[in-house]
Amino acid sequence: MNTTKGETNLSETSTLCPASGCGGCACTGCAARMSRRRFLKATAAVGGWMLGGNSFAAGDAIASLSVPKVKIYTVYLGGAGAWPKPEFDAPGEKAKFERFIAKLMPKFPDVELVGGDLVVSAKEALPKIAARDDVAGVLCIHLGIRGDLAGIVNCGKPTVVFSQPYSGHQWMYVSQAQREGKRVALMATRDWRELATAIVLLKAVGQMRQSRLLLASAKAGARAKDIRERIGPEVIDVTTDQLIAAHKAVDEKLATEIARSLFIKPAKKIVEPSKAEIIKSAKMYLAMKQLMADAKAQAIAVNCLGGIPIQILGYPCLGFAQLCDEGFVGACEADLDSTLTMLLFAYAFGKPGFITDPLFDTSKNAVIHAHCVSPTRMDGPGGTRAPFNIRTHRDDNRGASLEVAMRVGQPITCAKFIDDEAMLLSTGRIIEGKPRQFDDRGCRTQITTAVNGDAQKMMVNWCADMKKYRDIRTLLHRVVFYGDHARAVHQLASLMGFKVFPEC
């Protein structure tokens, strides 16, 4: 780690897990009440897994928090008939698909496929589907024209229809069903690899329904019911006292080792924060993780600006970044909309989100996205950490936060749930992303993104589609993710029943 004048070299040889970017644990109880020996042993033993097709590296602490498992009902629809040809062999075609899907499934240890019936009439499949309250959705592989697809999409569960060309003409019923409010998406393609996307989308829908979200030092109130019914996760309030108690319970030596391994040693520079401040942040990370493990939660949002005693807990910025790097969600300012968006994208695409305070630069047809908390593994938990410096929180020059250098040229998706029933969406490309490209003002991590559209129009119409919650946080915040996920977001909207509002 390099240091310059006025900076402190805090790097010391770590005795923690040798895996780069280790999240710190491999079983519940990784934080406050776990002994150092048990923690280190568990960290070294943790194995990788897959989320949305992205591998988690060993040591990323995924086993410490519960990951929802999902069952998907598969049904093959069609028989011999005039289309695609009279001698069409439906059982043989089904067998080909089954062999292909079997090769995909090792990538999805959190998914179990059930059913597998070959039917012509929906009446053959619907009773079996209806009897499976444990399935998250239905994957219908359309084989031939002899098949009641209209009946299948009325099964009452989120359904993805995979229909390759010449399977039949029933694909036309899907858009009709969507307009009627049915939760169905169509993949009309020759590319069988899209079956993996179908599994990912249904998995994400099911995982959202099984997820828990902790809201610390704030109250969800009546929104908790709407979120549960419309989007899926259960919102659980956590008091400030509970957060303080969890922070106090963290072992100081363990927090010191975590601080060295996860933040101090990998940092390019440590500019303002002291070693004690970084250790305080590591304790906050471990405290949040313990609360999540105890509640079997996958996300936490904290009212960190004015809602918690910073002098005791420090800012949770480093902890948020690390949780996101591990494939879970840590979100600032008790922002439920951004938290829900980040959780869905983590399940569907394996990407963490960067909550931002956007600013416009119409001279570049661009939006500047800036905040003092950012993941370092924007490619996903299995990706390489981006270079980062450890800085203070810029609003008050206190605590510890990360200044992350993101990849210039990277396509991005910018999104956020609104009103618990819709999602704002835009796409773009990072054209500036290194700390030296920005003035030392505003937030620590900054990127400039050229929008795929008209930035002036985007600015004028900002939040025009937002109806219910219009406080400064919900009006301002957006979440940036690596990759262009616009098409898949529209498919998720069809499966989950939310609207999509393009912003540019």
Image (cartoon, grey):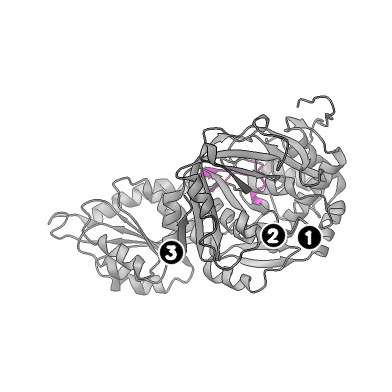
Magenta highlight on residue 56: yes
Q: Which residue is mark 1?
A: 307
Q: Cβ–Cβ below 8 Å for labels 1 and 2?
A: yes
Q: Is residue 329 left or right of residue 34?
A: left
- Residue 112: % across, % down: 47, 58
- Secondary element under disc 1, as helix, strand or loop, is loop
The residue under label 3 is which amino acid type? Answer: Gly
In contact (CB < 8 Å): disc 3 and disc 1 = no
Q: Is residue 248 among what the camera can see?
A: yes
Q: Amino acid at mark 2?
A: Ala
* 264 lies above or below 153: above
Q: Nearer the viewer, residue 131 or 472?
A: 472
Q: Secondary structure at mark 3?
A: strand
x and y percentages locating residue 207 in the rendered image: 54, 60
Residue occupied by mark 2: 334
| Occupied quadrant, residue 11 | top right
Q: Which residues are magenta?
A: 46-63
Asked if residue 322 lies left or right of residue 95, the reply is: right
Identify the residue under disc 3.
Answer: 137
Which residue is located at x 68 percent, y 67 percent? 236
Q: Earlier in the sequence, mark 2 or mark 3?
A: 3
Q: Would residue 226 be found to the left or right of residue 498 on screen?
A: right
